[in-house]
Amino acid sequence: MDNSTNNGIAPDADSLSADKLQRAEGLALLEAGNTAATPTAPDDAPIEDPDSGIDATGRPWKRVHLDNALKRPGPEITKVILRKPIGGDLRGTKLVDVYNMDVVAMSLVIPRISEPTIHRPEFMTMDGEDIASLSSEVVNFLLTRSQKAEAGLNG
């Protein structure tokens, strides 16, 4: 569906539903071990990190393994996929707070970019090491190429 009618500010409800469904299907395939669902590199390039990639919309994602499982009805959650935040995902926060891994700022951002969704009350009761793992991935997504090069990071 063409989102140009709303000036690209926010997708309409139909495209949101389709995007969420497409993401859920891709995540289900990933959890089943089918990495072809989310290509991480061209077919002839070696796959360096099977826990990261690019989703169907072109957004990078990273799988984070939790040290302490989230307990919910059903299976425990031991892995969470974070998508690279875009402008709307960062609303209501200050970038300096996000870069400083402020827990309150991250409790706003992470529910918007996590699959399965980690709700804010859940996030606020998580163990510190898991909050740090999730938060550091969010910050890594926001680093520029030059910042990554200066720090000696890939990307």
Image (spheres, grey):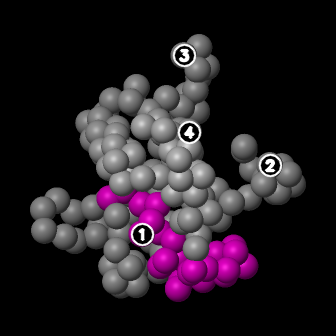
Alpha carbon separation for disc pair 2 and 1: 26 Å
Horizontal placement of 86 versus 83: left or right? right
Q: Residues within 10 Å of mark 1 (few under 14, many from 20)?
A: some
Mark 1 or mark 4: name the one nearer the start of the chain: 4
- From the image, which quarter does the N terminus lie in? top left
**Closer to the camera in the image, 98 or 71:** 98
Residue range highlighted in magenta: 92-116
Mark 3 or mark 2: name the one nearer the start of the chain: 3
Q: Where is mark 2, residue-wise?
A: 145
Query: Magenta segment: does it hold 93?
Result: yes
Element type where label 3 sits in the image: loop
* Residue 109 image point, x, y percent: 51, 71
Q: Where is mark 3, residue-wise?
A: 43
**Closer to the camera in the image, 116 or 152:** 116
- Amino acid at pointer 3: Asp
Q: Nearer the viewer, mark 1 or mark 3?
A: 1
Indicate which disc residue 134 carries.
none
* Residue 56 image point, x, y percent: 47, 36
Indicate which disc residue 58 carries.
4
Alpha carbon separation for disc pair 1 and 4: 20 Å
Write the residue at 78% across / 54% down: 144
Alpha carbon separation for disc pair 1 and 3: 32 Å
Disc 3 and disc 2 in contact, CB within 8 angstroms = no
Q: Where is mark 1, residue-wise?
A: 111
- Amino acid at pointer 1: Pro
Query: Magenta segment: does it hold 117?
Result: no
Residue 70 in view: yes
